[in-house]
Image (tube, grey):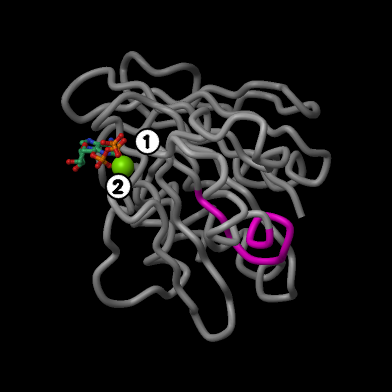
Amino acid sequence: MHVTIVARAQTDLAPPASPAPVSGRGAVSRLCWPDEAGCANSAQALARLMAPALRHGSSVLIELRGTLGAGKTTFTRHLLRALGVQGRIKSPSYAVVESYDVEGLQVWHFDFYRFADPREWEDAGFRDIFSGPGLKLVEWPDKAAGLLPAADICLDIDTDTDDRRLVNCHSETEAGCALVQAWVNHPAAQGDAPRLQEAS
Ligand SMILES: Nc1ncnc2c1ncn2[C@@H]1O[C@H](COP(=O)(O)OP(=O)(O)OP(=O)(O)O)[C@@H](O)[C@H]1O
Ligand SMILES: [Mg+2]
């Protein structure tokens, strides 16, 4: 399965409350997370949408871009927690990859910031991981340019203020577009906790 992500927060400077249209591959939607709680709510909404397909053996690849400290790992932590990962969720900055098994659901969290040797791609078995089922989240995907398959969800997180993040998202796959569409139209995509509770 393939995907793309979008979230928007309600702020005085944010775009209108209605979700940006997602009409197909490459269509970009702009989201705004007003604070980390909004990021968490949006991640939880996406986790709910992805979980059934993932548990039936689908593959989802999410690429996360943004400067140091933008929130790539933070979003990933909230997403993995919502999928049921327990215990410490470490940043893979040094190990390149951290993996999790949530009741049979395989998850890999990559950080290619220090990735420099393409031979590692084969030696470490990354090719097999990216061609198989499960959830793969990738920080700094451009450091592995040419090696990664098309992404279901591409998030580009921009720091607006200390707490607010502006997020551009799109999908590179047909299957991912459906997931993005569902996420954008979810009541919690804008990080609104009360509406998330009402929807559950
Ligand atoms: N709206 C928000 N969304 C996400 N993180 C936020 C938000 N507001 C504040 N933060 C904070 O920003 C920081 C983001 O750090 P994080 O490690 O997630 O960045 P990163 O993009 O993974 O950086 P790196 O490229 O170094 O791995 C955290 O301290 C988090 O608490
Ligand atoms: Mg990180």
Q: Is ligand 1 within 8 Å of the beta carbon of the residue shown at mark 2?
A: yes
As for residue 130 lying within the magenta part, the answer is: yes
Residue at x 36% of width, y 21% of height: 158
Part of the protein shown in magenta: 128-137
Q: Which x, y percent locates residue 16?
A: 50, 19
Residue at x 49% of width, y 79% of height: 102
In the image, 192 versus 182, the foreground residue is 182
Q: Report the image quarter containing ligand 1.
A: top left
Q: Which x, y percent locates residue 195?
A: 43, 51
Q: Which x, y percent locates residue 110?
A: 45, 51
Q: Is ligand 1 within 8 Å of the beta carbon of the residue shown at mark 1?
A: yes
The secondary structure type at the circle numbered 2 is loop
Residue type, label 2: Ser
Q: Disc 1 or 2, which lies upstream in sequence?
A: 2
The secondary structure type at the circle numbered 1 is loop
On residue 93, which mark appears? 2
Corner quadrant of residue 52: bottom right
Left or right of 114 in this view: 3 = right
Residue at x 56% of width, y 40% of height: 118
Left or right of 54 in this view: 81 = left
As for residue 131 lying within the magenta part, the answer is: yes
Q: Which x, y percent locates residue 83?
A: 47, 69
Q: CA distance from mark 1 to mark 2?
A: 7 Å
Residue type, label 1: Tyr
Residue at x 39% of width, y 73% of height: 85
The answer to the question of whether label 1 and label 2 lie on touching residues, with beta carbons closer than 8 A, is yes
Q: Which residue is mark 1?
A: 113
